[in-house]
Amino acid sequence: MDILPALLTGLALGSIYGLIALGFHITASVCGAVNFAQGSSAMLGAVLLWMMTEAGWPVPIAVGVTILACGIYGLVVERAAIRPFLGRKSDAWLMATVALGLVCDNGMMLVFGAEPRSLVSPLAQTSLRVGGMDLGIYPLHLLIPVVMLALAAGIDLFRRRTLHGTAMLAVAQNRDAAAIMGIPVGRVIAAAFALSSALAGIAGMLVAPLTHVESGMGVVLGLKAFAVAILGGLGSAWGIVAAALLFGLVEALVTLGVGSGYTQIVTFMLVIIVLAVRPDGLLGRAKVRKV
C-alpha cells in the first residue's frame, strides 16, 4: 500500500507546481514576460494564512484576505518590475522580478522569522481509512489536484467566454491592435499579474499544511513550477497541467524507489530530455517567425 500514498502525494505536489506554473503561462501569454517572483507569492500565501489563523481569524476570511493580498502583490510586481521595462522593450524585467522576489523573501524573514512553523489543518490531520485500514492519505492530498483542475478549467472558460478574458486574448495576440480597439492594455497586463500571483498564493496555502511554513519556501516551489511551465509549454495551459502531474508522479516514484537524494537529479534530467526531444514542451507549439 506504500505506492498509493506516494502516488497521491506526488499528484498533490505536482498540482501545487501546476498552480504556480499556470501563473507563468498567464503572464507570458498576455505580455511575453514571466513573473520570477511567483515563488515569493506562494510563500506569501502560506505565511499570511499562518499569521492570520494564529491571530484567531476565521479560516474563510483569512483565506480571502490572503488571496487578495497576493493579488495586490502581483500588481506591485507588474508596476515596479515589469511595466518600466516593457515600455522600453527591455528584457531587464527578468532580473527585476528576481530581485523583487528576494526583497519579499527577506522582508518576510524579518517579520516572520527564519524558523519553520506548522500550519494545522483538519484536512491534513486524520488520514483516510478503508475497512479499518489506514491508507496514509490525507483529504488534502485528494483536494489539491481537484482545485488545480477546477482553476485551470475556470481560467480556460474565463478567457474564452468572458469579455475580460477576450480582452486578455486580444492583448496577447497584438497589443498595438488591442490598444487601437480601445482595450486598456496596461490594465489587462496588470490584471494578468494579479491573477498569476493569486494562483501562487492559493498554491502556498494548500501546500502549507503538508510541509512547513517558512520564509524561504518559495524558492524551490518557484524553480520547480518554472520547470513544469517549460516542460508543458508556456503557451499551453493544459500542457502545463499534464506536465505538473507527470513531474509530481516522477518525483514520488523516484523518492519511493531510490530515495529523496536522487529526486532532483532525476526529475530535472527528465526536463532536459523532454525538451531535447520537444523544445516547445509537451503540448506547446513552435512560434512562427517572420523573416
Image (spheres, rainbow, N blue to C red):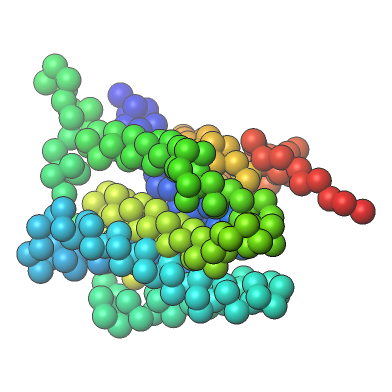
Pick the residue in front: 185 or 97.
185
- Image position of 142 (left or right of 36): left
Residue at horizontal 30 percent and vertical 24 percent from the top? 1
Indicate whether 221 appears above or below 78. Answer: above
The C terminus sits in image quarter: bottom right
Residue 241 location (% of width, % of height): 50, 38
Total numbered badges shown on the rendered structure: 0
In the picture as drawn, the residue positioned furthest to the right comes out as 291
Pick the residue in front: 248 or 42.
42
Indicate whether 54 appears above or below 109. Answer: above
Pick the residue in front: 16 or 94.
94
Pick the residue in front: 259 or 195.
195
Residue 247 location (% of width, % of height): 51, 40
- Image position of 54 (left or right of 188): left
Residue 116 location (% of width, % of height): 26, 66
In the picture as drawn, the residue positioned furthest to the front comes out as 181
Residue 273 location (% of width, % of height): 70, 41
- Image position of 277 (left or right of 151): right
Look at the image and tell me whether residue 287 can be seen. yes
Residue at horizontal 30 percent and vertical 63 percent from the top? 68
